Amino acid sequence: MATMTATIFGRWGVGAVSIAMLLVPAGGFAQDAVYALTDLGTLGGKRSVALGINRAGHVVGSAETADGRTHAFVYLTSALIDLGTLGGDESHAYRISDGGLIVGRANTTDGEFRAFVTSASGEPLDLSELDARLKGIFSTAVDINSAGYVVGYRQTHGDHMAARRRAFIYRNFQLVDFGAFGGEDGVVAAINEAGQMVGYFGTEPHADYADHRGFLLDETGLTDLGALGGKMTTPTDLNDARQVVGYAQVSSGENHAFLYQAGRLTDLGTLPGGTQSYAYAINNLGQAVGASDSSAGAQRAVLFERGVPRDLNGLIPAGARWLLTEARDINDSGQIVGTGVFDGQVRAFLLTPTGAGTLLPVRTGFETIP
Amino acid sequence: MRANGRRLGFLLTAATLLAGLSIRPVEAQDLSVVGQWSSPQAWPVTAVHNHMLPTGKVLFWGYSDEAWLWDPATAGLTPAARAGYNTFCSGHSFLPDGRLLVTGGHISNDVGLSNAATYDAASDSWVRLPNMNAGRWYPTNTTLANGDVLVVSGDVDTVQGVNRLPQIWQGATGAWRDLTGAQLALPLYPFMHLAPNGRVFASGPSQVSWYLDTTGSGSWSAVANSIYGFRPYGSSVLYDDGKVFIVGGSDPPTNTAEVIDLNASTPAWRSVSPMTYKRRQINATLLPDGTVLVTGGSSSPGFNEPAGAVYAGELWDPVTETWTTVASFTQYRGYHSFTLLLPDGRVLSGGGDASMSAEVYSPGYLFKGARPVITSAPSTVTYGQPFFVTTADAAQISRVSLLRLSSVTHAFNMEQRINRLAFSAAAGGLNVAGPTNSNLSPPGHYMLFILNGSGVPSVAKIVRVDTAAPPAAPSGLTATAKSATRIDLTWTDNAATEDGFRIERCTGVVNVTCADADFAQIAQTGPNTTTYSDTGLSAATAYSYRVRAFNGAGNSAYSNAATAITPVPLL
C-alpha cells in the first residue's frame, strides 16, 4: 500500500503545498452576507437532498420520484435531472467534479449497490464492470477530483461476521485497493485535487458500530487526526490546503464539528445553547459548512467562521419561508448546497452569494487556537 | 518491606490472573433468590432481533431475514416467513392490532434500507409499507398513545450520516408523517420512551436527555443531563409510570445506574446503587414484579470483548434501589444478544455474536411456592373500562400488572413497559380497573399478570389494550301507536358496550316531511334497554323515530327509522 501511495502522489507531481498561500487572508469581522436562495425542487416526489456542488455551480444529490423512489440527480441550470439507477430502484449522487463527473451508489436489478460514475448526459457506469472486486455485496464511490480520481469503498464479504470494508481509488479503468489503512475496516470520505485523502478506520473486529479513528493520507503517510474526548472521529472533507473538516464524538456522546490543520484538531463548537454540530465540507478559501443544533432544539445549517458556527438562516432573504437545516458542500465561489424545509417538505437548496457581505474562512490562518 | 513486597507481588499476580478470567461467581443455592438457568438450546441463527408475539411465540432473526419462531411451551423451532429483504439492523415495535412494524434494515455497515414492513403473526406473513424518507440502519421505533409509531435515527449511509428526520407511521392513513421541525442527529438505536405527558423521552445513550413533541412538525426540548455521561451499549428501562432507569454501558464499561422521574416538575437524573459488575453490551428486562434483570455483557474495555464476559445476572429492585446477584448463565452474551420476558414469567436469553443458542431463566419468584392462576380474562380491555379476571386465588392477590410485549435488539427493548392496575377481590375473581391513560399504556398487546403476596406471578394472559369504540347500532326499530297520545318503540340491542340509547323524533313522515335535520333527541335511556314509550302526543299526527346507542367513545350509527300515526280520539 505504501508503494502504491507513493506512486499515486508521484504521478500527480504533488509536493509540499504552501498551505498559507491557499488560505484567505484575515478579513476582520464579517458583515451579514446575503445569499440568493434557489429551491432545487424534487423529481416529482416530496423530498430532495443536495450533497455536492462543483466550481460551475452544478449540484448533485438525491430526490424522491413521483412513485416514491429515491434517485440521484444533477442540477445544472434549472430543473433536476434524474440520473437513473443501475437497473434497481435507488441511487444517490454524492459529489460532482469540476469536469462534471458524478459519483455515488446505485442499486442493480438484484438490489445490490454498486459504485458508479456518470455525467449529466451519460448513463451511470457501474465500476464493478471494470473490476470484479467491486462485484461483492456492496460498493460505493464517495468523491472525485478534477483529475478523475474516484475514491470509495467496498464490502468484502456477504457473511456479517466476515465482512470488512476496504477503500479503493479508481481512474482510467484502473482500480487500486487501499485496504483498511491498517485497521480492521476502512472507509474513505474525500479526496482533494492533490490526491490527498481523508477517511476513517475501525479498530475492532466484528463490530458494526465500533470506535473509529479519522486519518489524513498524504505523501507523508497516514496521520491520525486525534479525538475530541470520544471514541469516533469522522472526517468528511479536505481542501487543497489539507485543511480537514468533519465531526468527532465528545465525552457526552454527541458529535462536534472539527477542523484539523497543521497537526491540530479543533472543536468548532455549536450554535448558542446547542449540543451537537457537524462540518461537512470546506472549500479552498477555508470556508466550511455544516449543521448545528441550538437552544431551540432542532438542527440548523451553519457556516463556520472564525472557529464558530454561524446560522445560515440569518443570511438568506427575509421572508424566504425556508428553514435551512444542513449545509453539505461549498464551492470556491462560496455557493452552498444543502437541505432545508420549505412548505413543510424536506427540500434541497442552493445558496449563491450576492456580494452583499464578506464571508470569512473557518480559520483565518494560523492564529492561536483556544 | 520485603513482606509488603511479597504481598504486592501476590496481589499483582492475582490481579493478572483475574484479568484473564471471565467473571463467574460462585452462585448461592437459594433458588428463590438467585433463580435458575436452563441448559442452552441450539438455535439455527444468532438471534439479534427478537419479539414476543401476541400468539405466544417468539419471532427472531439474525444477520439476514431468515426468521424463526420459538414456542415457549415446547421449545420447538419452526421457520417463519421472510420479509424478502435484509431486516438485520432494523427497528421494530408492535402496532395496536398486534402486527410487528419493522423499519429500516441492512445494506452494509452504516448503510440502511428505507424499507418498512409489517409481520402478521396470525398469518405468518409480511406486507411491505411505503418506504421511509431515507435509509435507517439502527433506528428506534416508539409506539405512541394513539397507536402510531415514531421512528428516529438510523444511518442513511457513510456520506449522509444518520437520518435526522423523525417520521411517524400513521395507521389510519397508511402513510408517513415527517416531523420536519425536529431534525436532529440522535445516536444509533437511541433509548426512547413514551412519557406520561405524551412526549417521547430520549434517555440515552448520550448524556443529554430530550423530549420530542410529536405534534405538528415536531420539536425537541432538552430535559436534563445524565450524571455518568455517554453510555453506549448500556440500556434503559421505563420501570414505572414516568420513571426511567439507565444502567451500564460505556467504554471502559461502567456499573453505574441512574433514575429520573418525569413526573417531577423539573426532572433530574439521580444516581442509584451501582451493579456489582461493570458491563456493556447488556440487556435489561422488566419482570412482572417490577424488578429489572440485567444480564450479559462484558466488563473489559473495547467494543465487544468476550474475555470480560459477565455471566452473573443482577436484579434491581426499584423499591429499595438495590441489587441482588442472581444465577449465572454459561455463555458470553454480548453484542447482538437479547433477553425478553415470556408470558410464563421466565426470561428468554440468547444470541450474541458467534452464539447460535438461547437459554431460559426462571427467576427466584418461580421457586417461592404455588403460582396464582388466571382461569380466564378478556382478550381485549378498553381504556377506562373495568374488567373481570376469573381466578380461584383472588384472596391472595396483591398486585395486577400489565407488561407490554417485548421487541428487543442491540441492548434496548423498544416496547417493554409496566402498568400496575387497581383491583378488588370479588366472588370468583378480581374486578380490575382498565388502564385509563394511553400515554402510560399505548394501545397494543400486553401480558396480564396477577401476583400473590409473595410476589409470585401467574402465567400471563395476553390481552389487547385498545381504545373503546362506539357501540354497535341498534336495529329493528318499530313504532306502534297505543293511544291518541302515546307511541311505543321497540328495537334490538346489538351492542355489548353501550352506556345507553338516544331516541330522536320528528313530527312527520320519513323522507316525506322529515329530513335528517328535522329529528331531535327526545329521550335517553340506560344500557340494555329495548323499549320506550313516547307520551303526551297529539292525536291524528304522524311521528317518526330513530334510535342510536352511545358510550364514552361516541354514538353508534342510527337504527332504521320507524313511523306511527296517532289515531283520532273517539268521542
Image (cartoon, coloured by chain):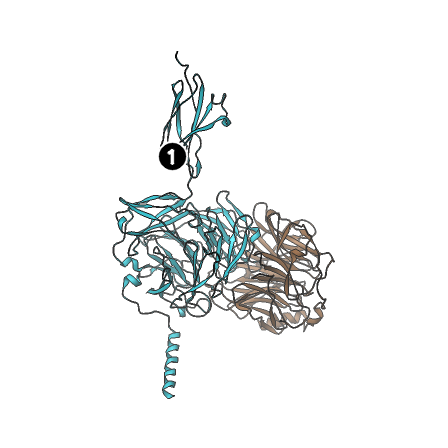
Q: Circle 1 — which element?
A: loop
Q: Position of residue A298 (x, y in %)?
A: 57, 56
Pick the front one: A300 or A237: A300
User: Residue A57, image x and y in percent?
Assistant: 69, 56
Q: Nearer the viewer, residue B386 or A218?
A: B386
Left or right: where does residue A104 sit relative to residue B94?
Answer: right
Q: Quadrant of the C terminus of chain A?
A: bottom right
Total of numbered circles in the picture? 1
Residue located 27% across and 48% down the image: B394
Estimate the x, y position of residue A199 in percent, counting from the top left: 58, 66
Chain seen in brown: A
The residue beneath circle 1 is B495
* Residue B378 visible in the snapshot: no
Can see residue A322?
Answer: yes
Question: What residue appears at the point 30 percent right and 62 percent down from the top-left corner?
Answer: B33
Quadrant of the snapshot with the N terminus of chain A: bottom right
- In the rendered structure, which amino acid carries the disc numbered 1? Ala
- Residue B208, given in percent of the width and then of the height, sits at 51, 61
Read off the chain for label 1. Answer: B
Q: Label 1: few (<14), some or many (≥20) within 10 Å?
A: some
The residue most toward the top is: B571
* Residue that sits furthest to the bottom in the current view: B2
**Identity of the residue drawn at 35% across and 33% down:** B528
| Residue B256 sits above or below residue B535 on the image | below
Q: Nearer the viewer, residue A151 or B332?
A: B332
Q: Which chain is cyan?
A: B
Is B467 placed left or right of A274 in the picture? Answer: left
